Image (cartoon, rainbow, N blue to C red):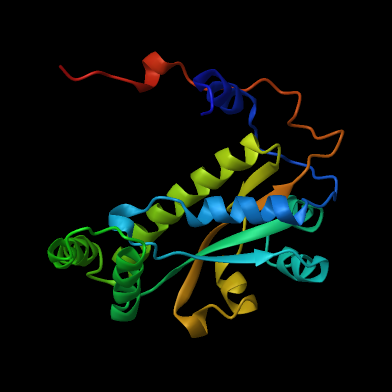
Amino acid sequence: MTDCNEMLRIARERYTTKHYSGKKIPREKLQDLLEILRLSPSSVNSQTWKFILISDQQAREKMAQVVADFNKERITKASDVIVFAVPEKISEEHLQKVLAKEIADGRYKDMKISGALDAGRRHFVGLHTHSVADTLAWETAQAYIALGFLLFAAAGMGIDSTALEGIDFDKLDELLDLKSQGLRSVVAVSLGYRAPDDSNASRPKSRLELTDLLTEFK
């Protein structure tokens, strides 16, 4: 079990990489990271996200054409990029797939409760799917849970990362042909290893004090 002090060390030392070296992440290490991403939590285990891995150099150079100038090298000199996409509509097929996987994985010792839990998931999905905008907002929140999971895991594995929002997401959707699949890209992350002269590496981490952020209800 990882010591809590080690977790705190990772949180203190992890930072957003500004300049990458071009060094590739070993593929077995990347596969471990992708498995961690698969295991990310989501509200009612909805798992509505899709992850698009972009490792090929030419593919990353194509993606760089739809990002802001300051992010281009964070695409082309990274080892890998992952785009997070979510569907415009949560389909019946998807809900059935999630339930079938839960059953196959042995989540329900008593099969009688599977229907009730499926109904509960559908209830909460229904609360957030009154419109496409409503659905995308809820699903984007879930995608950011997975993003946070990935960023922390990467840091723990000695892999640098950059969450990317300086992107023309409409153009990225076109590039990746997401609209034909009923998907929208919402965020991306670069993964790799920092350049020796990365400008952000030597800057002290700056966060507001806990007393500025935390109140306790009694």
Q: Position of residue 178 (x, y in %)?
A: 54, 77
What is the tally of numbered marks visible in this picture? Answer: 0
Q: Quadrant of the C terminus?
A: top left
Residue 174, compared with residue 200, is above or below; it is below
- Tell me if I can see residue 189 in this picture: no
**Residue at horizontal 58 percent and vertical 22 percent from the top:** 6
Instruction: Answer with left or right where residue 77 lies relative to residue 159.
Output: right
Residue 139, compared with residue 176, is above or below; it is above
**Residue at horizontal 36 percent and vertical 68 percent from the top:** 101
**Residue at horizontal 41 percent and vertical 58 percent from the top:** 140
Q: Position of residue 46 (x, y in %)?
A: 33, 62
**Residue at horizontal 62 percent and vertical 23 percent from the top:** 205
Q: Position of residue 120 (x, y in %)?
A: 16, 61
Residue 52, compared with residue 178, is above or below; it is above
Instruction: Answer with left or right where residue 133 lies relative to residue 83.
Output: left
- Tell me if I can see residue 188 in this picture: yes
In which image quadrant can residue 160 be found?
top right
Q: Nearer the viewer, residue 97 or 214?
A: 97
- Residue at the far front: name it: 109
Q: Nearer the viewer, residue 141 or 193?
A: 193
Q: Position of residue 192 (x, y in %)?
A: 75, 47
Instruction: Answer with left or right where residue 166 lies relative to residue 39.
Output: right
Instruction: Answer with left or right where residue 70 lies relative to residue 24.
Output: left
